[in-house]
Image: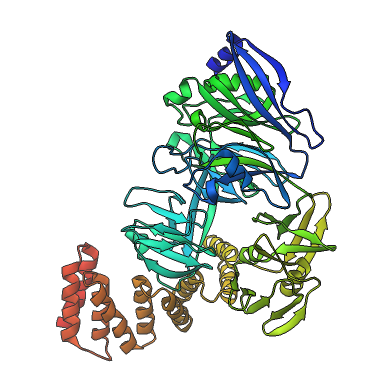
Amino acid sequence: MKKYGFIVFCLLIILIITFPCAVFSQDSSYAQTINVQLNGITREINLVRIDLRDPTYRVEAAVAKGQVGKVDSLADIAVQLADNETEVIAAINGTFFNAYSDLQPAGNIFIGGKPIYVSNSGTTIGFTTDNQIELAYLHTSIKGSINGNWEYPYNWEVWGINQVYYRADANILYTPDYGSQVNAGNKTAVVVRNNKVVEIRKGVSPIYSDGYTLVFGAQSYASMFKIGDAVDYKIQYSNIDFSAKNGKGAPKEWTHIRTAIGAGPMLIKDGNLVLDAVKEGFTGEKFTSRSQRSFIGQTADRVLVIGTVPNATVYELATILMDMSLVNAMNLDGGASSGLYYKGEVIKNPGRDISNAIVITRKKTNPVRLELNGRELFFDTDAFLENGIVMVPMRGIVESMSAEAGWDPATGTLWACKGDTKIEMWNENDIVRVNGVYRKLPAPVLVRFNRTHVPAEFLAELFGGTVSFDATKNMVIMDLNIVDPDDIYEKAVNAYAGGNIGEAVELFHQVHNIMPGHAGTLLKLARHYDKEGSNERAREFYEKFLAIQPENHDAWLSLGWVYYKMNRLSEAKEVFARLTNKVPNAAAYWIALGDVYAHYQIQDGTNARMCYENALKCSSDKTQISTIQSRINKLNN
């Protein structure tokens, strides 16, 4: 850090404000031009300042033409976000992208609280709904489950979201932000709608608006799925461990961030110059040489500052921003991508179409925030007040409750399902049908911005709970009596590992009552009762598990032994024989089948000996070989 202090000391910086493009306006945003002299060289800096203490401002990330991997002009990307309720104030180019090849971004992009592109490198700037700013070295990982099982062999993970990888073993999750389809080539595409696998295929595969498509280059993952499986995934955040080649470091809370863009390097944090381009991997000539630069930062009094600087290194950029009293700042994409837009005017026009941008909008009214069971939710449309009644986005909320939602275009029926509860509704109609029974709402269903909104109090009444409004935060607070079976399952697993067996079993049964097809719970209960010697209960849960995961050979082996202990020998023989057919080189399966033939109620020594001899051919374990030989000797005697 000493060399950066030396740069600050040696560079003579004189800021001369020559003229503003617009005077301070009542909406607390303005553009200006500043002349800066560094070592006798004058640079004209274009800036836009926006007071983020005004809650009607919102910082957004936007991708060209609404899709990852497209390009467009900065102005056209910005105006995508304009509508009857939203004015576009300003925009600046965002993260890096592959301008000369596949047009893919090269940094994180978060929209509406969700990552639509992941890159575990560099710096990420995040914005909360109330316009707080956070700079982070962010690492994102994506882990998934099949039928509620988050553990081996039914857990899976992907490398990223909406990326194009050319490696044959790449595993990627594609969302509708990528487009309506993806070409999986020779990899396996697992097409998901409403958290259910609906298709498994290769080549060009659909990405549905109510789901996503997983593309697996690793056959070990691809072979785990079957049509009808329930799948889910979780996003986990941590700090980047630069010492481990951008590996996963300490966990980090990031779920409160609504919008984020990743680029870098970080220049200033908490008022301190922290530039370390080499650590972040920015070592190319375009970072060490002078070039057109774009940046984003903030002052201590929460004024957002975005701008462009010509003919500067990132080190010089950092010193300029320090002298401008920014307390947080980072470098964005630059060169021909550098551009700045303010209120319909392109102040600095990029030299090419770009991939993405940071766009600052202003709502006509203060946006209504939404919290569900202690966690703020972000959607592509906001809650709003209609004649004093709080209207909330239906699909987003029910999907947050692990439920399903959809639309029947043939009848115009909007529907949502949660467990045994099915809701049917119609736009601009205050009558809904719940499990076939008609009910009247406090206000009609309204479709705004292509999203269905319903009265918040209706959901509270339907699922049990309360609705309140925090005027200081302009936030709807919904506390609904809903539980996430995966959360209970995790508590049960931890309790079992900690020796609290009774508590764990009770929690596993709670999960089973909520989600009978939760495969992880079924297997845990089966193993528990098997260990306890409760054969009938073990059989029950092994059979339920195998109805969902029929290719789990270990579970079949365990079920076979349960049958054996219950003296259901014909069923045990059938299970073990099937296993030897499927995996003929597994000694354990031959031993099990041999034991059935050797049972005193069957006493088929010929077949028992044949099984044991096959087991000997498969085994290389000395202890196992000794056990097999003792069985053969017992037959001979």
**Quadrant, the N terminus:** top right
- Counting the numbered discs, the total is 0
Way the structure is coloured: rainbow
Residue 250 in view: no
Residue located at (61% from left, 43% from top): 78
Residue 464 x %, y %:
74, 72
Left-right relation of 126 to 233: right
In this rendered view, identify the residue nearer to me: 159 or 342: 342
Q: Is residue 390 above or below residue 579?
A: above
Residue located at (65% from left, 78% from top): 421
Q: Is residue 560 above or below residue 2?
A: below
Left-right relation of 200 to 301: left
Left-right relation of 576 to 128: left
In this rendered view, identify the residue nearer to me: 578 or 611: 578
Residue located at (34% from left, 56% from top): 217
Residue 77 x %, y %:
58, 44
Residue 381 in view: yes
**Quadrant, the C terminus:** bottom left
Residue located at (68% from left, 28% from top): 327
Q: Quadrant of residue 262?
A: top right
Residue 398 x %, y %:
64, 67
Residue 187 x %, y %:
33, 58
